[in-house]
Amino acid sequence: MSAHPCADSYSHAITAAATTGLERHGHQVTALDLYDIDFPPAMTKDEHDAYKAKQPPPDPTVRAHGELVQQADTLVFVYPTWWSGPPAVLKGWLERVLVPGVAFTFDAKGKVEPALTNVKRVVGVSTYGSPWSYVKLVNDNGRRTLTRAFRLTCGRGTKTTWLGLYSIDTSGPNERTAFLDRVEHSMTHMK
Amino acid sequence: MNTLVVYCHPDPESFTAAVRDAVVESLTAGGHDVRVRDLYGEGFDPKFSAEERRTHLAPGPLKSVEAHAEELHWCRHLVLVYPTWWSGQPSMLKGWMDRVWVRGVAWELAPGGKRIKARLKNVRRITAVTTHGSSKWVNVLEGEGGKRTVTRSLRSVCHPLTRTDWLAMYGADASTAEQREAFLAAVRRKLGKVKR
C-alpha cells in the first residue's frame, strides 16, 4: 500500500525498494498505489449505512481490496507521516475496506473478533518531517494505528515491523540512499 | 469567544450530529460567536493533491481552502466533533488537517531553519468531542492515537498555553439511549461553562 500524491516522490522510491526486497525473498507482491488509482478517501453515507447493517460495502473496488487483504500473508504500508498520522487517503482506505466481515466480526455480545488471522506480519515504512524525539513526544499516532489498532484484528502471533526515516526535510542524499538500502535489506531478510 | 466548530460525520441523522447540536446550542447560549463547518455537508475534498505537495513549501493554502484557513485564524476556540474510527479522526477530518494546516497557515519555517514555528497563536482552547465504538480499555491498548493527535500534534502549533479538553464517549456501539442522553448532557454542561 502506498499513499503519496507525486509519482516521482521519495516515498515511491521506498515502495520500489520494498518490492524489490520482497520479490527477491520469493514473495508474490500486489501493489496498491492509492493516489494512482484515485481512491476516494471519505467513507460515504451509503457505506456507513452498510457498515451499520453489517452488509458488504456497495463499491466493488472496495470489496476487491477487502479480498486482497484477506489473502495476504504480509501487509506493507508506505506513506509520509502528516500531522502524526497517515495521509487522509490511507486513513480512509482503512475505514472503507476494513469493515465487519473483512477485518473483524461482532460476536453475539457485540464484541469485536479479529478476522484477519491470515496476516502474519504488518510492516510500516514512513517518512517524518520531524526528528525522532518529537515523533515519540506526539505519540507516533500513525504507527500506533497500524501496529496496535489494526494489529488487533490480525492473529495472536502477528508480528510488526516499523522503519522510519526522521527529519527528512534536512536529510541528505546519503541518508536517503542508506534508508532505501535498509528497507530493501529488511524486506529481503524478513522471516 | 470566537469559536469554530468542525463537524465530521457522513450521516446527518447520526448521534454525532446530535452531539454537534448540543455543542452549538450550549456555546451559543453562552454568548460565544460560533461558526460551524460541516465537512461532509459541504463536500470537502480530503485528498492532499500533487499540486499541493509540489507547492507545500510555499506559504499559504490553495484557493479552494482559503476560507477554511481564514476561519482557523479567526477562532480562539476550536471544537472538533467526530466519531473515532481506527483509533483516529475520520479521513475527512484528517484531510482537513492535511490540506488546511499548511505552511503559512498553521506553521512557518524560516529559510534554512530546522524547527517549525507555530502560527496559530490565536487558538487558546481546543475541545474534541468524539465517540468510540470500543471501550476505554481497548482505546488505551491501541494508544489513543486520535487523542494525542489533537492534544499534542495539533496543539503544538497553537498558543503555548492552549488548553485542551477531551470529551469522549467510549463503548458507543453498545450504548443505551440513557447513556447517550447522559453524554449529551455532559457535553452541554461542559461547554456551557466555557467562559466568554
Image (spheres, coloured by chain):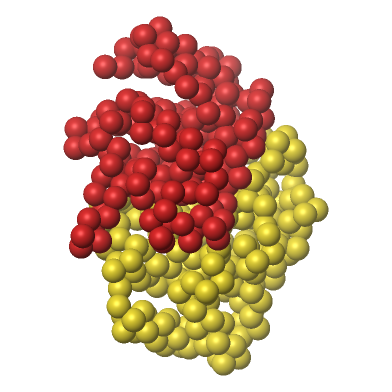
Chain colours: A red, B yellow
Instruction: Pick the residue in front: A141 or B89.
Output: B89
Q: Residue at x 28, y 42 (%)?
A: A115
Q: Is residue B34 left or right of residue A62?
A: right
Instruction: Pick the residue in front: A30 or B48.
Output: A30
Q: Is residue B185 left or right of residue A127?
A: left
Residue B177 in sight in this render = yes
Residue B87 appears at what percent x and percent y?
Answer: 38, 53
Residue B64 appears at what percent x and percent y?
Answer: 77, 54
Name the quadrant of the C terminus of chain A. Answer: top left
Total numbered labels = 0
Q: Residue furthest right?
A: B63
In the image, is residue A93 above or below residue A1?
below
Q: Residue at x 69, y 41 (%)?
A: B49
Q: Is residue A24 left or right of residue B53?
A: left
Residue B162 in sight in this render = no
In the image, is residue A184 above or below residue B26?
above
Q: Quadrant of residue B92?
A: bottom right
Residue B1 appears at what percent x and percent y?
Answer: 61, 82
Q: Is residue B148 left or right of residue A32?
A: left
Q: Residue at x 55, y 60 (%)?
A: A45
Residue B19 appears at what percent x and percent y?
Answer: 48, 77
Instruction: Pick the residue in front: B29 or B115.
Output: B29
Q: Residue at x 43, y 38 (%)?
A: A66
Instruction: Pick the residue in front: B75 or A147.
Output: A147
In the image, is residue A51 above or below residue A102?
below
In the image, is residue A139 above or below residue A22?
below
